[in-house]
Image (cartoon, helix red, strand yellow):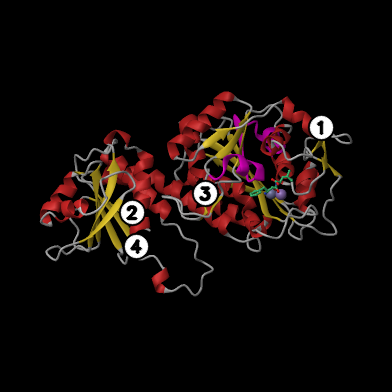
Amino acid sequence: MKISFAEASLPKSGAVVVGVGEDRVLSEAAATLDRDTGGALVRAMAASRFNGKKEQVLSVLSPTNLSIGRIVLVGLGKPAEINAVLLQNLGGSIVAHLGGSGEADVAVLLGEGADLGLPAAEAAAHIAFGAQLRSYRFDKYRTKIKPEQKPSLKKLSVLLDDAAGARKAYGALEKIADGVFFTRDLVSEPGNVIYPESLAEQAQSLTELGVEVEVLDEKKLKKLGMGALLGVGQGSVKPPRLIVMQWNGGKSKKAPVAIIGKGITFDTGGISLKPGAGMEDMKWDMGGSGVVIGLMKALAGRKAKVNVVGVVAAAENMPDGNAIRPGDILTSMSGQTIEVNNTDAEGRLVLADALWYTQDRFKPVAMIDLATLTGAILIALGHEQAGLFANDDALAEDLIAAGREVDEHLWRMPLGDRYDRQIDSDIADVKNISGTREAGASIGAVFLQRFVNGAKWAHLDIAGMAWSKRDALTVPKGATGYGVRLLDRYIAAKHEG
Ligand code: BES
Ligand code: MN
Ligand code: ZN
């Protein structure tokens, strides 16, 4: 969707959006329009249940004395509660409401003096950001889509005195939206299109933005001793890859922040085969790596003053004559041997090598991995927030705080010896499952912890968050891009400058 900011007054056509506070307190712009329409807005509110509560929307077809198509009242809620997230949600609900309405253009009239909790320019930028995030679609394979199934809305402009200030504030947000969209695109693609090599090609497109990208093939992985990543990939005709992306926007000697992603481009379970029903969902088992790649795009796009490395461990988990068997023992890059008692616990295997490699090569200030690691986290937290595991309290708190600010929530879950000892193996150094279903997300996390070598580390289990079956205000159903905004915020708040 095309976003713009302008100082112009009332537009000549299209839809016009104005804000209404709780208890039907009209913003200045809304009051003016109410006068222009001979009181149509106040009458419409009185005739409906619209009372200005946040997330409420009321459309009024414009009377014939005005050339605009319709006037849309949006609830602003209580002035004290207005913040960036509420404004983003407001932008999203405008698109949800008008997307297929027949209107092509919408102008959001902030009006000066409106109490939006933050400076008008920033408020305008956040409304636009939310609208843009909600406008995302993945239609490339729908060749027979009918015109009436396509969105009508093409353009959103926010009108305010400080249009230049809004444009400036939107600059960085637009780049973050680009990153979120890249993640959503990658995660939406099916397994026959996105596999380790093609995922690597997608990452390579970031070189245009100044990201350094290296792709390690099987030969290099073998040389490095990445037996865990290679083991997971050996049942597939699509060979595994390790993708290393570096954005060096900070001081040259400063140690980077490292973000690592699980990149299982399709997870059948391997020889420990998953049930058939719902297996198509496992195309998004590269959701963590999708976030890493989208985040690198956002950071490079907005020229973040920080050094960040993104590492993706990409493999396809297939059953095959050459696949690993339950009971097989793999030697990881760390030297630790792993008894693979369930080939469906493959994410932790590829991450074991990626985590070890990352701390060994980059000595990062902090290492954060994202993975659709366990069904257990979905049982614990649902689709409301991701599970956070961390060996450092300050890192955990910083991530939770960043999540709150962008409405991508995290809930801290436990690590600890009591879980760790459950993955001691009788025949190797560690086994990849405990053998019970109990505390499954923590078991996955303590397995990863054996490969972080004491680095400051956090693990985000995003199995419940990467994909959504329901529309949300700024996230249409499908691939969510959850994690890009969160990590962008964390990096901006804690590492930039
Ligand atoms: N990719 C799955 C986890 C998953 C499940 C993500 C459902 C999204 C939705 C992972 O590789 C897996 O299969 N985990 C197993 C681990 C078990 C074998 C210890 C699981 O959660 O069942
Ligand atoms: Mn699996
Ligand atoms: Zn998996």
Q: What is the number of the mark on residue 424?
A: 1
Query: In front of the other: label 1 or label 4?
Result: 1
| Location of residue 265 (image quadrant) | bottom right
Which SS class for mark 3? loop
Spatial CA span between label 4 and label 2: 10 Å
Q: What residue type is labelled 2?
A: Ile
Relative side of 484 to 22, left or right: right
- First reached walking from the N terminus: tag 2 or tag 3: 2
Verify CB contact (< 8 Å) between mark 1 and mark 4. no
Task: From the top left corner, tell me how far across and down residue 402 is, in percent.
Answer: 48, 34
438 in the magenta segment: no
Spatial CA span between label 2 and label 1: 53 Å
Q: What is the number of the mark on residue 153?
A: 4
Query: In front of the other: label 2 or label 3?
Result: 2
- Image mark count: 4
Q: Which amino acid does label 1 sit on?
A: Asp
